[in-house]
Amino acid sequence: GDSVTQMEGPVTLSEEAFLTINCTYTATGYPSLFWYVQYPGEGLQLLLKATKADDKGSNKGFEATYRKETTSFHLEKGSVQVSDSAVYFCALPSGGSYIPTFGRGTSLIVHP
Amino acid sequence: DVKVTQSSRYLVKRTGEKVFLECVQDMDHENMFWYRQDPGLGLRLIYFSYDVKMKEKGDIPEGYSVSREKKERFSLILESASTNQTSMYLCAGGRDYGYTFGSGTRLTVV
């Protein structure tokens, strides 16, 4: 079945550092790919998505490129801020099963 | 903006109580989901529904039931609350183009 593997956290960075959160997936075909963000005490929000191979999704300074060859969708940001502290989830849509697949989440902590 | 609204942000209930968590969406989604989220365990699917009156068990349905009498409303029911159901509960709606989550309900069972 479909699966998503994310790097384990927490990831701890200083403000203005470069961020990478790795995500790899296993899926049938070439589904859309998502990154969600969850701020403390909140639900998940869609951060960005890519709908086909080689697409780059971007939002709020975050980027991720859909790499079919390596089945990856790594999240990057050039300069993180304290306000980026949150949990980040990589996800696949459901395909034919109704149920989306979420990674376990990666906690990011940014220090001033 | 599309919205998924969960009726309560925080709830405190007593062991043995019947608890209702309500979720309403305004996106005309057929698919709706209930998850619970616990530290270190990620999101775990309790139940989902792909249409009115249709429901399917997720990974951890024991101790829970659901109701979907109207397309916009998906309710999670704890038949007899227990302390091990203390958790964050998240409702979501959506399809393959994306999923929208509510703000969550932090339930404490004492």
Image (spheres, rainbow, N blue to C red):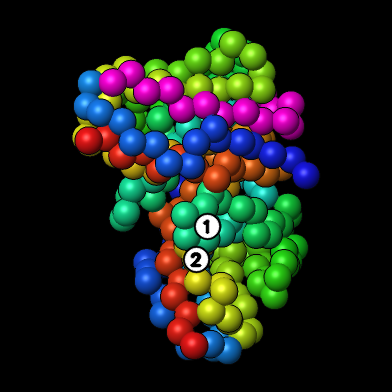
x 53%, y 87%: residue: A15
Q: Is residue A66 visible?
A: yes
Q: Residues within 10 Å of mark 2 (few under 14, many from 20)?
A: many
Q: Which residue is mark 2?
A: A86
Q: Is residue B48 above or below residue B103?
A: above
Of the pair A91 and B76, the residue shown nearer to us: B76
Q: Is residue A14 magenta?
A: no
Mark 1 and mark 2: span between their CA atoms? 6 Å
Q: Position of residue A8 (x, y in %)?
A: 37, 66
Which residue appears at 37% of the width and 23% of the height? Answer: B19
Find residue B25 and report its horizontal and vertical position in percent: 66, 30
Q: Which residue is at a point 69% across and 28% down the rendered structure image?
A: B29
Q: Nearer the viewer, residue B9 or B86?
A: B9
Residue on which disc 1 sits = A38
Q: Residue B102 has which mark?
A: none
Q: Badges 1 and 2: C-beta atoms under 8 Å apart?
A: yes
Q: Is residue B30 above or below residue A86?
A: above
* Residue A68 point in image, percent of width and height: 63, 60
Query: Disc 2 on helix, strand or loop?
Result: strand
Q: Position of residue A1 (x, y in %)?
A: 46, 39
